[in-house]
Image (cartoon, helix red, strand yellow):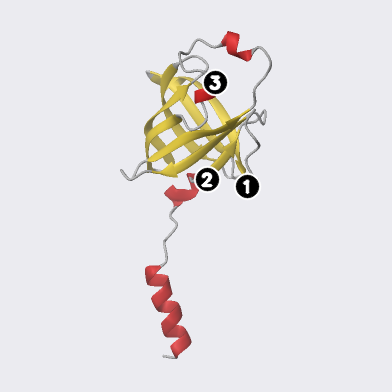
Amino acid sequence: MTINALIILTLSWFSPQTTDSDQIIGNWISPNKDLIIHCFKGNDGKYHGKMAWFKVYPGDETHYDCDVSQEQWVGKTVLTKFTYQDNEWSGGTIKDLKKCSNYDAFIVLEPNGELTATGFIFFRWLSQSTTFSRYLGVLPKQE
């Protein structure tokens, strides 16, 4: 075995391995391009997401039912405790900050690379889905 092969083999043992479950990690932007969620793996081994950025529309604050002000939205956890099994992240909850509601949820990575998050009440067929695209740019400045 040559020294180069030995170095490559050693580095592969110690480099972090990306699994299918880690494909959710990163920033994801909503279809209307007005919301970016940052997904990450927590110390508990589960997947979570925080509000990274959102677009402020004039007069919006009067339409929200939540006691969390818009100034506190960035950094707020909105995806909690998802685990990966059978090609989906499930067992977690989504928090809708506009309505101050929590929903059971599951998330699927579509073949085209988009992420579909589905929140539901009691049954999966009583659901609403939103599809996000991976966001690789610099986060916009929060207004």
* The C terminus: image quadrant: top right
* C-alpha gap between disc 3 and disc 1: 24 Å
Q: Is residue 14 found left or right of 128 in the rendered image?
A: left
Residue 43, placed above or below residue 105: below
Whole-percent x, y for residue 65 in the image? 50, 10
Kindly indicate the quadrant of the structure image that contains residue 92.
Answer: top left
CA gap between label 2 and label 3 equals 23 Å
Which amino acid, by three-letter code, is at mark 2?
Gly
Could you tell me if the residues under marks 3 and 1 are in contact, i.e. CB atoms within 8 Å?
A: no
Q: Secondary structure at mark 1?
A: loop
Secondary element type, mark 3: helix
Which mark is on residue 87? none
User: What is the crowding at mark 2: few (fewer than 14 residues within 10 Å), some, or many (at least 20)?
Assistant: some
Q: Position of residue 53 (x, y in %)?
A: 58, 32
Give whichever of 42, 92 is nearer the camera.
Answer: 42
Residue, disc 1: 136
Judge the density around disc 3: few (<14), some (14-19), many (≥20) Cα neighbours within 10 Å. Answer: some
Q: Residue at x 37, y 71 (%)?
A: 13
The type of residue carrying mark 1 is: Leu
Residue behind mark 2? 26
